[in-house]
Image (tube, helix red, strand yellow):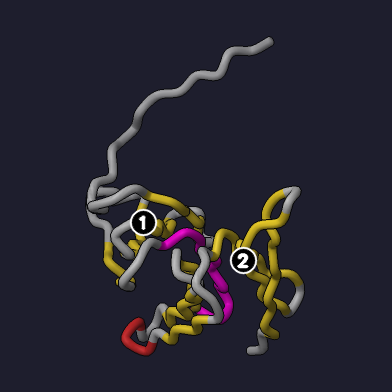
Amino acid sequence: MKSLQIAKKTQLTGHNAGIYTLVMDEDNRHFYSGAGEGWVVRWDLEAPENGKLVAKVETNIFSLLLLHQQQQLIAGNMEGGIHWIDLNAPENTKNIAHHKKGVYAILHIASFILRLVAMGSLPNGLLLTCNHWKVSN
C-alpha cells in the first residue's frame, strides 16, 4: 500500500474559535470557513494570509452551502438559524429561525435546499428532521 505524503504549506489564522465547516468555491482558488465565534470568512489560496470577513452572526456556524450561480452562501448555526448571505451585498443577509437546535448539514439537490437538524431524542437515537426550500434564479 502506498503511503500518503503530507506537507504543511501554510497556516491560516483569523478565527477566534474552532472551525466547524469549510466549503470550496467553484474557482478552486477560494474557500469559506465557518466557526464557533459566528464568523464566515472567505480565503484566497494564492494569498492565504488575507482572509476576508463575509458575515458575522451571534452563535456558532455549523454548516455552509455555496450557491455559486446565485452568489449566495447559506450558513446554518447552532440555534437552528439559516443565514442567507448575498455575497455581492453581505449587509442584506437574511436569517430564518425555525427551531432551537443546530443545523448540521445543508445540501443542494436539484432546485431544493435541504437542511438536517436534530430535534430531540428517541429510545433508539436522535430524531432528525429535514426542511427544504425551492431555489430559483
Q: Does residue 9 appear left or right of residue 114 in this picture?
A: left
Q: Nearer the viewer, residue 86 or 102?
A: 102
Residue drawn at (73%, 51%) of the image = 123
- Check the image and report above or below for 12 versus 68: above
Residue drawn at (69%, 62%) of the image = 128
Viewer-side label of 2, 1? 2
Image location (x, y in percent) of residue 92: 37, 89
- Rendered image quadrant of residue 8: top left
Residue drawn at (55%, 72%) of the image = 68
- Mark earlier in primary sequence (2, 1): 1
- Check the image and report above or below for 92 versus 49: below
Image location (x, y in percent) of residue 85: 43, 79
- Identified by mark 1, the residue type is Ala
- Check the image and report above or below for 6 versus 112: above
Tell me the magenta residue range: 61-71
Q: Secondary structure at mark 1?
A: strand
Most distant residue in the top direction: 1
- Identified by mark 2, the residue type is Met
The C terminus lies in which quarter of the figure? bottom right
Q: Secondary structure at mark 2?
A: strand
Q: Nearer the viewer, residue 128 or 14?
A: 128
Count of marks placed on residues: 2
Q: Which residue is identified by label 1?
A: 35
Q: Does residue 12 appear left or right of residue 69 in this picture?
A: left
Which mark is drawn over residue 119?
Answer: 2
Image location (x, y in percent) of residue 114: 67, 71
The magenta stretch spans residue 72: no
10 Å crowding of disc 2: few (<14), some (14-19), many (20+): some
Q: Does residue 12 appear left or right of residue 61 in this picture?
A: left
